[in-house]
């Protein structure tokens, strides 16, 4: 069996981690896998820290500059560039593969080039919509809504006509898929890199502070770092030496910096750019608490990376990750509002040993349920069922 996994630009993100872990795990169990990205940035590949054989990639790796603060116009142009590159390449090479496995938009749109000649199994990390930089303009611009409506109609037609099977990352996202496409999807919870995120708690904190909190991810509205900053302002009344590290980059950097200054928290909120996975694992394990107060997310790997690193976590009820947390540690869930987050932070602070006990239990569950091998085996089982193989 030979599988082609396709994705737009390789950047530092959860979907990219899943793709590289999947490819490596499939190869270990004897499956031939190639990876096709519209563009690969060597720096992003190094930061992701997942060793991948060079012959996995079927295009050259370059030193392209990672673009994090693009407006919607230039981001749209980038999507069209990605679509055209992937479409043209797939049209030439698809006959050499048994299955095409596209991931993020517009990768699955490019499978129109195949014309249903071979199965397309789409791994849907997010249902098409106004995410990232488009969210702000969608809320503020009257032109964005009709354009997005038209794009969603095209998206639905492509998925219904050209996608054979859908894999998704949570029951939450499966419901969105059913609503948008009237299609059933298979839920397979995504893996984390257990070779990196499996550490004992350490006391060497990255910043000075009695209680150091961390949030990791792109700086966009839906990640809701603003509520973490507002929650810190409340928490400091009870824990004066508390600190917050915000690690990531994105279009909301200036807004968050301004909010920090307005709240007079410039010494208490520390902004860090993306770091490599080994360094990130050390930061996770040395902080006292991880925050994941997202407004909306199909899943979310970072809470599980933190838990596997031995750090208690607060998770928004509005993400797919909450499905697992609800089952084993519902006390770690919260609504993503500043006062609710602050209240939960103080609850963890006052009952830290109890939350550490839960973290240890969750660490064992994560090692069992979110391993790359298990994810690859479940994915392969589904692919074989589509191909009619035993």
Image: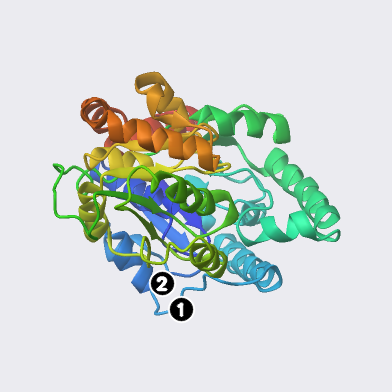
Dot 2 lies on which element?
loop
Whether residue 1 can be seen here:
no
Instruction: Indicate whether 270 appears above or below 153.
Output: below
x and y percentages locating residue 231 in the rendered image: 47, 46
| Occupied quadrant, residue 57 | bottom left
- State which tag comes first along the sequence, 1 or 2: 2
Looking at the rendered image, the disc whose residue lies closer to the viewer, 1 or 2, is 1
Q: Which residue is mark 1?
A: 65
How packed is label 1: few (under 14 Cα within 10 Å), some, or many (20 or more)? few
Left or right: residue 218 versus residue 368 is right
| Callout count | 2
Give whichever of 222, 287 is nearer the camera.
287
- Badges 1 and 2: C-beta atoms under 8 Å apart? yes
Q: Which residue is mark 2?
A: 41
Instruction: Indicate whether 325 appears above or below 213.
Output: above
x and y percentages locating residue 234 in the rendered image: 46, 45
Whether residue 256 can be seen here:
yes
Label 1 and label 2: CA atoms lie apart by: 7 Å
The numbered disc on residue 367 is: none
Left or right: residue 70 versus residue 206 is right
| Occupied quadrant, residue 372 | top left
Give whichever of 347, 41 is nearer the camera.
347
Dot 1 lies on which element?
loop
Residue at image location 39% in from the left, 56% down from the top: 34
Left or right: residue 110 versus residue 272 is right
Residue at image location 60% in from the left, 57% down from the top: 132
The quarter of the image holding the N terminus is top left
x and y percentages locating residue 334 in the rendered image: 48, 31
């Amino acid at each position: 069996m030979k599988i082609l996994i396709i994705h737009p630009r390789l950047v530092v993100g959860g979907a990219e981690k899943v793709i590289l872990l999947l490819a490596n795990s499939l190869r270990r169990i004897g499956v031939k896998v190639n990876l096709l990205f519209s563009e690969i940035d060597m720096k992003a590949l190094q930061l992701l820290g997942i060793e991948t054989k060079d012959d996995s990639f079927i295009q050259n790796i370059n030193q392209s500059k990672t673009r994090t603060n693009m407006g919607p116009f230039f981001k749209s142009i980038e999507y069209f560039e990605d679509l055209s590159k992937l479409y043209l390449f797939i049209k030439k090479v698809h006959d050499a593969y048994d299955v095409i496995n596209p991931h993020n938009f517009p990768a699955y749109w490019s499978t129109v080039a195949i014309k249903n000649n071979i199965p397309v199994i789409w791994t849907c990390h997010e249902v098409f919509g106004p995410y990232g930089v488009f969210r702000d303009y969608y809320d503020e611009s009257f032109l964005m809504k009709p354009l997005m409506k038209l794009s969603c109609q095209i998206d639905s037609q492509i998925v219904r006509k050209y996608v054979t099977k859908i894999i998704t990352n949570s029951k939450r996202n499966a419901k969105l898929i059913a609503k948008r496409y009237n299609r059933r999807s298979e839920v397979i919870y995504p893996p984390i890199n257990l070779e990196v995120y499996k550490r004992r708690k350490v006391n060497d904190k990255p910043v000075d502070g009695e209680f150091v909190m961390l949030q990791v991810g792109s700086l966009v509205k839906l990640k809701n770092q603003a509520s973490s900053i507002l929650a810190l302002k409340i928490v400091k009344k009870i824990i004066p030496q508390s600190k917050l590290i915000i690690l990531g980059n994105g279009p909301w950097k200036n807004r968050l910096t301004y909010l920090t200054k307005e709240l007079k928290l410039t010494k208490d909120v520390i902004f860090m750019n993306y770091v490599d996975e080994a360094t990130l694992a050390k930061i996770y394990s040395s902080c006292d608490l991880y925050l994941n107060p997202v407004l909306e997310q199909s899943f979310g790997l970072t809470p599980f990376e933190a838990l596997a690193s031995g750090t208690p976590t607060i998770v928004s009820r509005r993400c797919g990750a909450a499905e697992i947390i609800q089952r084993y540690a519902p006390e770690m869930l919260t609504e993503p509002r500043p006062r609710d987050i602050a209240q939960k932070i103080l609850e963890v602070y006052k009952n830290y040993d109890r939350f550490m006990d839960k973290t240890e239990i969750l660490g064992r569950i994560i090692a069992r349920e979110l391993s790359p091998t298990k994810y690859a085996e479940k994915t392969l089982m589904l692919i074989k069922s589509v191909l009619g193989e035993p």
